[in-house]
């Protein structure tokens, strides 16, 4: 590592040009090849996967449809024969891309009328079809917007909703991009007091994100990309990219202030902070790799993207960064921001706050350990009541007009809400025996018609694919998709009703899918895979730390403390988002649940990011121990000497993650709060109280390594 840093510092311009060429090639090449997205058929899991695949692959020759809801502006009943309504329906029928408007459905109280508008576009996942449907939906939107003022008219459908939500996510991502850069730069200005020193970590992190985005496009042809990948790459890339550069630059400046020349300072920084960056990066990559064991397309995509951005950030910090430090030399401290520079110089000694905390912790380590553990366990306790659910349409941002319309439709027409999709298909692709299937449907209809768990008063009808090999039967339920009663009705269909109706037909398979089924199956999959992911991440992280520090105690301590940090973040997440007290503060409406995929995602991300601090702090402690200090002295010295950079790194991460907590999408909001809370806990209670108290109690046993583990290779510089 020192050799790489010295080479980069010696051949500074060549190293920098190679880095810039790599970034440019990655983003240009990625843009040229494009990105392969996860297909609907790849995302099904569990019992619903077979039904999903059968329905997606079948050709039902169905066109896109949009639902238009008409209500009186005064809240009264709607006259479907009024001039305002007939003009509206005529304009809808005449809109470009529309082939017909169905007869109206009138709500029981007469206050709402629903029209189904058929588009001249077949349903499918082809990009041209999706674009055509979006264009036709936009034409309908213009008619809706131009409706008579006596009417309150709204629109929702797959095309319009997809377009609206895509715009919401795009706006959120742009907002995160626009805010994360200036916020990170401002924090770096406070940390360094000089513009160049502040800009280097931010620009290097940004270039790492850009390069990783390009590389992710190439990787998507092996592991298809998910729609939230760009947001996660930005979030993780800015956090680790700034942190890694911060660790390195702070150490290089520290060595120069001791009187070393630029080249020697770069070499010492490479041997210390550079080594810590590589070890930390390796631990983070291993943690991210745990997502591969989730067995689901979204997690596999996130694993690839996060591994790439962390790897690129590590490479940049040990190649491009030494080159930049060599180019700028002592000019990296220019131009100085007078007030911030004076504050930095004044606080250049041992931080008084950390001295005040560490004093009693090291004098009374047992008391500190118990107090710290109790605090984290108290924070983690609410997680025992965590409920998991995938957000439905009604759980999305109420600022989206299509979501408002959907809510109004499901209120006025309960049968238009959640539903189970029963699929029946032949195993060899031959046409179904329609008489047998219709008989099964009649039996199923008799079973659900009077059952209050279903909303099938109008009867069940099968829709057959064009080749007759697949049939779809929609079974409405009068509940939200994540209601326990909707899950009960799903279980009844799967366990009894569907097998009884179709199980006796030779050569035929059947299954139940839909939003409730997908939610249940996804949740069950993650519950099954979570122990595997945790076991892999724990084992591999312990191995890497043993190889890096030649200590089993350090590795086990890191694993235990990281688990506590994650548990505390789960508790806070549950406390905030499963209740309504924080709705006004964070701008959301509680769904009473945590996004299903978030706990596993938070575990791997937090376990990896927590290693940043642990590796850096323990590296400084080990330096003191190797220099002959006693364990309490080494702990005190290492934590205090690393306090400034650890605090700065934590502030950067918390700031970047907090930006996501301000976004509109509930998944981004929960992700931001969970990550920010965990990093804050990790950089304070864990690093200031638990870590020093444990290491003080262990004493020389901190560096104990069982003889069998001596055979492991050593991660040295």
Image (cartoon, rainbow, N blue to C red):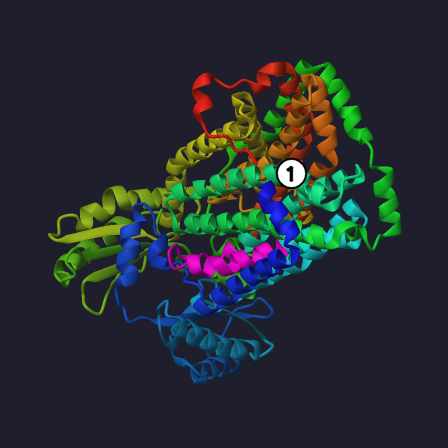
Q: Can residue 402 be seen in this view?
A: no
Disc 1: which residue: 273
Circle 1: is it few (<14), some (14-19), or many (20+) Cα within 10 Å? many
Horizontally, residue 671 falls left or right of residue 369, namely left
Q: Is residue 492 magenta?
A: no
Toward which corner of the image does residue 108 lie, by quadrant? bottom left
Q: Which of 552 and 605 is in front in this view?
A: 552
Residue 712 locus on image (x, y percent):
45, 27
Q: Which of 2 and 697 is in front in this view?
A: 2
Kind of element beneath mark 1? helix
Q: Is the magenta stretch mostly helix, strand or loop?
A: helix
Q: How many numbered badges does the structure rendering display?
A: 1
Question: Does 457 appear above or below 272?
Answer: below
Horizontally, residue 569 falls left or right of residue 131, namely right
Question: Does 428 appear above or below 705?
Answer: below
Q: Is residue 226 magenta?
A: yes
Question: Does 36 appear above or below 293?
Answer: below
Q: Nearer the viewer, residue 421 or 314?
A: 314
Rendered residue at 16%/55% (across/down): 427
Horizontally, residue 655 falls left or right of residue 117, namely right
- Which residue lies most toward the left here? 506
Rendered residue at 79%/36% (across/down): 258
Give the residues drawn in magenta, as a range. 205-229
Q: Quadrant of the N terminus?
A: top right
Q: In which quarter of the image is the C terminus?
A: top right
Q: Is residue 649 visible?
A: yes
Rendered residue at 75%/37% (across/down): 644
Residue 578 locus on image (x, y percent):
56, 41
Residue 52 locus on image (x, y percent):
31, 55
């Amino acid at each position: 590592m020192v050799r790489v840093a010295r080479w980069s510092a010696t051949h500074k311009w060549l190293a920098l040009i190679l880095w810039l060429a790599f970034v440019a090639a990655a983003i240009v090449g990625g843009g040229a090849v494009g990105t392969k997205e996860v297909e609907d058929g790849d995302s099904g899991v569990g019992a619903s996967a077979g039904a999903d695949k059968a329905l997606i692959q079948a050709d039902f020759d169905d066109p896109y449809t949009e639902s238009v809801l008409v209500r009186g502006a005064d809240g009264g009943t709607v006259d479907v024969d009024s001039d305002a309504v007939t003009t509206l329906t005529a304009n809808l029928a005449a809109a470009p891309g529309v082939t017909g408007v169905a007869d109206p459905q009138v709500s029981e109280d007469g206050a709402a009328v629903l029209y189904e508008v058929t588009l001249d576009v077949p349903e499918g996942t082809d990009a041209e079809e999706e674009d055509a449907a979006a264009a036709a939906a936009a034409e309908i939107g213009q008619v809706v917007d131009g409706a008579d003022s006596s009417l309150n008219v709204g629109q929702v459908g797959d095309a319009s909703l997809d377009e609206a939500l895509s715009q919401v996510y795009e706006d959120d991502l742009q907002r995160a991009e626009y805010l994360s850069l200036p916020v990170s730069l401002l924090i770096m200005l406070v940390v360094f007091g000089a513009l160049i020193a502040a800009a280097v970590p931010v620009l290097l992190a940004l270039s790492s994100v850009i390069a990783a985005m390009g590389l992710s496009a190439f990787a998507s042809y092996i592991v298809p990309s998910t729609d939230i990948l760009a947001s996660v790459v930005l979030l993780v890339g800015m956090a680790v990219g700034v942190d890694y550069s911060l660790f390195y630059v702070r150490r290089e400046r520290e060595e120069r202030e001791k009187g070393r020349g630029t080249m020697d300072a770069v070499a010492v920084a490479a041997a210390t902070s550079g080594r810590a960056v590589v070890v930390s990066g390796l631990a983070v990559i291993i943690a991210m790799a745990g997502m591969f064991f989730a067995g689901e397309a979204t997690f596999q995509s996130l694993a690839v993207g996060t591994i790439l951005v962390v790897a690129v950030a590590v490479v940049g910090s040990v190649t491009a960064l030494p080159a930049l430090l060599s180019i700028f030399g002592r000019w990296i401290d220019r131009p100085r921001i007078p007030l911030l520079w004076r504050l930095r110089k004044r606080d250049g000694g041992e931080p008084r706050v950390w001295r005040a905390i560490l004093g009693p912790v090291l004098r009374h380590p047992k008391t500190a350990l118990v107090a710290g553990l109790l605090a984290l366990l108290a924070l983690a306790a609410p997680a025992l009541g965590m409920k998991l659910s995938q957000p439905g349409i009604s759980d999305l941002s109420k600022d989206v007009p299509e979501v408002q319309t959907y809510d109004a439709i499901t209120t006025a027409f309960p049968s238009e809400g959640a539903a189970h999709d029963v699929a029946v298909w032949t195993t060899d692709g031959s046409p179904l025996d329609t008489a047998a299937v219709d008989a099964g449907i009649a039996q199923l209809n008799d079973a659900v018609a009077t059952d209050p768990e279903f909303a099938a008063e109008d009867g069940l009808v099968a829709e057959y694919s064009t080749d007759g090999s697949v049939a779809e039967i929609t079974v409405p339920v009068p509940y939200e998709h994540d209601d326990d009663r909707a899950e009960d009705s799903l279980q009844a269909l799967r366990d009894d009703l569907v097998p009884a109706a179709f199980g006796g037909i030779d050569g035929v398979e059947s299954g139940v899918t839909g939003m409730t089924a997908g939610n249940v199956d996804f949740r069950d999959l993650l519950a099954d895979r979570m122990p595997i992911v945790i076991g892999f991440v724990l084992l591999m992280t312990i191995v890497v730390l043993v190889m890096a520090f030649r200590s089993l105690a350090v590795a086990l301590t890191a694993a235990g403390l990281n688990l506590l940090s994650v548990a505390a973040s789960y508790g806070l997440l549950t406390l905030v988002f499963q209740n309504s007290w924080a709705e006004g503060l964070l701008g959301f409406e509680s769904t009473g649940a945590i996004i299903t995929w978030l706990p596993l995602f938070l575990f791997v991300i937090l376990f990896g990011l927590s290693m940043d601090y642990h590796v850096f702090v323990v590296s400084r402690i080990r330096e003191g121990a190797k220099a002959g200090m006693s364990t309490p002295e080494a702990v005190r010295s290492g934590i205090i000497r690393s306090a400034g950079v650890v605090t700065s790194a934590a502030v950067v991460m918390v700031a970047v993650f907090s930006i996501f907590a301000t976004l509109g999408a509930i998944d981004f909001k929960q992700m931001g709060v969970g990550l920010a809370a965990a990093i804050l806990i990790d950089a304070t209670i864990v690093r200031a109280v638990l870590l020093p108290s444990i290491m003080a109690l262990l004493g020389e046993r901190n560096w104990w390594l069982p003889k069998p583990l001596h055979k492991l290779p050593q991660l040295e510089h």
